[in-house]
Amino acid sequence: MSDALQFLMSGLVVGSIYGLIGVGFTCIYNVTGIVNFAQGDFAMVGAMSAIALNVAGVPLWLAILLAIVITSVVAVLIERTAIQPVRGDVMRGIIVTIGVGVVLQGLAAIIWGTDAQPMPAFSGEKLIHLLGATVMPQSLWVIGIGILAMGGLDLLFRRTYLGQMFRACAMNPFAARLVGMKVETMSLVGFVMSGALGAIAGIVVAPIALTQYDSGLQLGIKGFVACIVGGFGGPVGAALGGLVLGVLEAFSAGYVSSGYKNAIAFALLLGFLLFRPGGLLGDYDRVRA
Amino acid sequence: MMTTKAMLAALILMTSAVGAQAEDTIKIGGLLETSGPLASLGQPGLEGAMLAVEQINAKGGVAGKKLELDNVNTEGDNTKTVTAAKRLLEQNGVVALVGPMNSGSSYAIIDTVQNAVTPMISNGGSRGIVLPAQDKKWLFLSPLTDVLVQSVMMTDMQKRGAKKIALLYADSPFGTSGRDQLVKNAGSFGLTLVAQESYANADKDMTPQLTKIRSAQPDAVVIWATGPGQAIAVKNYRQLGLTAPLYMSHAANDFNFLRLAGGSADDVLIPSSKIYVIDSLKDSDPQKAALRRFVTDYQNKYGKPPATFAGNAYDAVNMIAAAIGKGGTDRAGIRDAIEGLKDYVGVTAVYSYGPDDHFGAKADSVVMLTVKDGKFTLAQ
């Protein structure tokens, strides 16, 4: 029994990690329609900058804040130099983000080297015992930040004027421009938010998972699967999809064999794409219409 | 247009000049991975290899010629390793190879190296690379092998009265080779393997596997893996409140592991070469002087203490050089000379190769280490 509880706990934590990355995908997607395959690399850039600043003597919280700003600036640069030139072409935009991911990995390897880096936990490493399962305090940070990010973005997209403008730009940029919206500015705002969220995700996960120049790749893939499972575009769906994936992985590792972990992720991905492309929560656009 | 032609001509002249110059050197090839998942092994490996070349050339080289190391970054990727090995063997004319750290990459080039009839000393830790020695005529290992260090490790377990042991291994050639050997040999040390679990190298959480291991109530636990994953596994081990003695593989005797695992690494037991405990060695230890020279020179050249992997590649280059000194620059001569090395004092081990033994390293080169306050010390 306590075994099952530990598997569940582990699954929820890992699932929150996937969910956090998945939530980051929705920012850019909901403004431009582009699936940003460099989202995991934003997380890596955020975590690596925070670690480097911290090692250089900057206090942890200030280092985290600066790292979020740095990653947002990186996102802006990417939007201006790589996404604007192919503006309006979603397919090309997606392919560009794959290239951007490779470039970010290469730069990270040059700047920070190829070794994995540890990061101090936010509030110590004293274990918390919960009904026979043990949890690291950092795990609660991951889950908490995940809920905050999901809830905040969901409110933003559904309830605010800015959110409505975002969606309008993605659905029909031409019509959005006709009614006076600045589509380019919106796109930029989307990238800034995505960069900041990615950095937050990477930083909060770093004390648990360690970070190296290519950490973003796997995180990005799992975050993408989370989005597909939950329904692409919706922050709630992304978080839910992440949790489903994480818990399934943990139980399969616990009761069957960890060898099937990635197989499960890709089976979920294929299954949902083939039989339920709208994800668990259904098509995000249709729900809202 | 003319300028392009002129530049091309200049380029051709330059390259042919380089070609002519290379005649005065003996070239050996390196396949060390300086990026990719095993970069933290390959990078110090390359540094160790370059130090060896520098030391040899400072003493006038071998057989009257300078030694030159031509390393291609194989990125821990099997396909890239095959391409790199072919390039070094067929185009660059190397007389011997220093193999990759990655056991998988080493397996991938066995046929390439055998067919090229060129000797290679691999840095992979998996025994299968050179087994059976009669068929793998051209392949040798420089690191401590898993069977060797496991025998020392299991003797230590016996001493501590362990009967039931559990294993967590990485799903990599290094990890599965370690598992196979442990499963095969545990019985002869009076040990029963009550649980075995695996994880993928890129995994971020091993608590489900370790929870299962906890339920099996072992007297000792072994984590057999390479890279950052083993640091996460050790953190998870402490997190779950497991108290049985924790044994790691010889891939954990690495500063990176200490840095990543932090306080969780205290009290783990690691079978290792003597590289980190030189001061605790008896003066009669044959390796003491060689180790001292290696560590001092490495520290001076790179400004940091050497990792085990630096020692592996350093030994490999030195043994190839010693073999060239004895057998000349003929590839078959070098091979026979490596096989003929007896009691060669390296920094990782004292090596004695033979027609049936391409491992070289012997058990008395292995000591048990533990970690106290973030530092390696001899285990009591």
Image (cartoon, coloured by chain):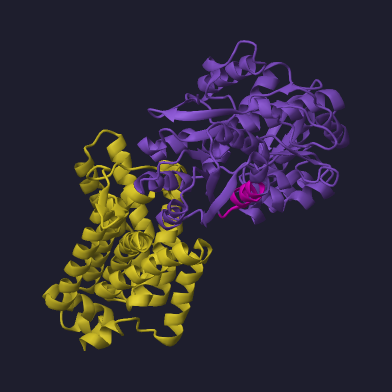
Chain colours: A yellow, B purple
Is the residue B303 above or below the residue B158 in the image? above
Residue at x-position 22% and y-position 68%? A150
Quarter occupied by residue A287:
bottom left
Q: With respect to residue B129, does B51 lie above or below?
A: above
Q: Is residue B118 visible?
A: yes
Q: Where does residue B154 sit, x and y in percent of width and height?
A: 60, 37
Percent position (x, y) of residue A243? 32, 68
Q: Is residue B293 magenta?
A: no
In-image side of A35 versus A173 (left or right): right
On the rendered structure, is A116 left or right of A278? right
Name the residue at 69% across, 47% down: B106
- Quadrant hosting residue B96: top right
Q: Which residues are magenta?
A: B171-183
Give the position of the N terminus of chain A as an image quadrant: bottom left
Name the dominant secondary structure of the magenta segment: helix
Report the number of discs.
0
- Relative to B350, is A156 above or below? below
> x, y (%) of residue B109?
73, 50
| Residue B328 on image: x %, y % | 86, 27
Judge from the rendering whether residue A226 lies leftward or rightward of residue B139; answer left or right. Answer: left
Q: Is residue A81 visible?
A: no
Question: Quarter of the image holding residue B371?
Answer: top left
Residue shown at the point (42%, 73%) measured from the top left: A92
- Quadrant where the C terminus of chain A is found in the figure: bottom left
Q: Is residue B220 above or below residue A241?
A: above
Q: Nearer the viewer, residue B179 or A87?
A: B179
